[in-house]
Image: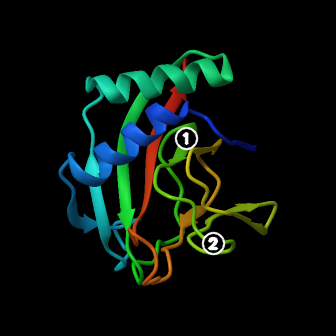
């Protein structure tokens, strides 16, 4: 199962999340998709009691109309050349929210394998993708674009279990 919701947050909140994750929350160049992976990109592990996290988790539960337990939350930052690796999440249901500016079609896609076929989801600011966590997936980096203000692709992830 995979679902996509565009314009998940109102514009002011979406812009606030983008500004916060781009400029205010610390992030570190030390994250790999799996322990065996050599691909490295930026990551910020978030505290489940952070007010912004609590708000976004509340919104996710309302979106699917189900009670959930939050297992882990973080955001990833990929710049050009920072490829993501195929992996599964160790939870039951994952939410991936596309934080930063919309990229060109087929650039910075979220890829997910469903029934042995790769589905590519374009990176669109304020888009939420949620899916069964056992589905293999990855995030692709943006391409270098000199005209773009920011060459970063940020996704915010909630990893959850059903109550």
Residue 144 in picture, x, y percent from top left: 45, 84
Q: Secondary structure at mark 1?
A: strand
* Number of on-image labels: 2
Q: Quadrant of the N terminus?
A: top right
Asked if residue 115 lies left or right of residue 95, the reply is right
Which residue is farthest front? 147
Q: Residue, x 52% and y 45% (percent of image)?
A: 97
Q: Give the residue number, with chain letter if any, for mark 2.
A: 104
- Mark seen at residue 95: 1
- Callout 1 environment at 10 Å: few (<14), some (14 to 19), or many (20+)? many
Do tag 2 and tag 1 residues touch (Cβ < 8 Å)?
A: no
- Please name the residue shown 41% across and 80% down the image: 80
Give whichever of 21, 158 is nearer the camera.
21
Label 2 element class:
loop
Give the x, y percent position of residue 46.
Answer: 27, 39
Q: Residue at x 39, y 47 (%)?
A: 18
Image spot of residue 58 (x, y percent)? 48, 19
> Which residue is nearer to you in this view: 110 or 162?
110
Toward which corner of the image does residue 49 lie, by quadrant?
A: top left
* Residue positioned 56% across, 52% down in the render: 125
Q: How is the image coloured?
A: rainbow
């Amino acid at each position: 199962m995979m679902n996509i919701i565009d314009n998940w947050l109102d514009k002011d909140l979406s812009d606030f999340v983008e500004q916060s994750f781009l400029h205010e929350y610390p992030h570190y160049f030390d994250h790999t998709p799996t322990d065996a992976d050599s691909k490295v990109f930026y990551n910020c592990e978030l505290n489940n009691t952070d007010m912004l996290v609590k708000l976004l988790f509340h919104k996710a539960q309302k979106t699917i109309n189900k009670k959930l337990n939050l297992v882990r939350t973080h955001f990833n930052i990929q710049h050009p050349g920072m490829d993501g690796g195929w992996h599964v999440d160790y939870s039951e249901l994952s939410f991936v929210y596309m934080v930063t500016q919309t990229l060109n079609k087929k650039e910075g896609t979220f890829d997910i394998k469903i029934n042995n076929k790769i589905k590519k989801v374009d990176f669109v600011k304020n888009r939420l993708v949620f899916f069964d966590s056992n589905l293999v997936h990855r995030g692709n980096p943006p391409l270098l674009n000199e005209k773009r203000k920011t060459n970063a692709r940020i996704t915010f992830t909630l990893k959850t279990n059903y109550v």
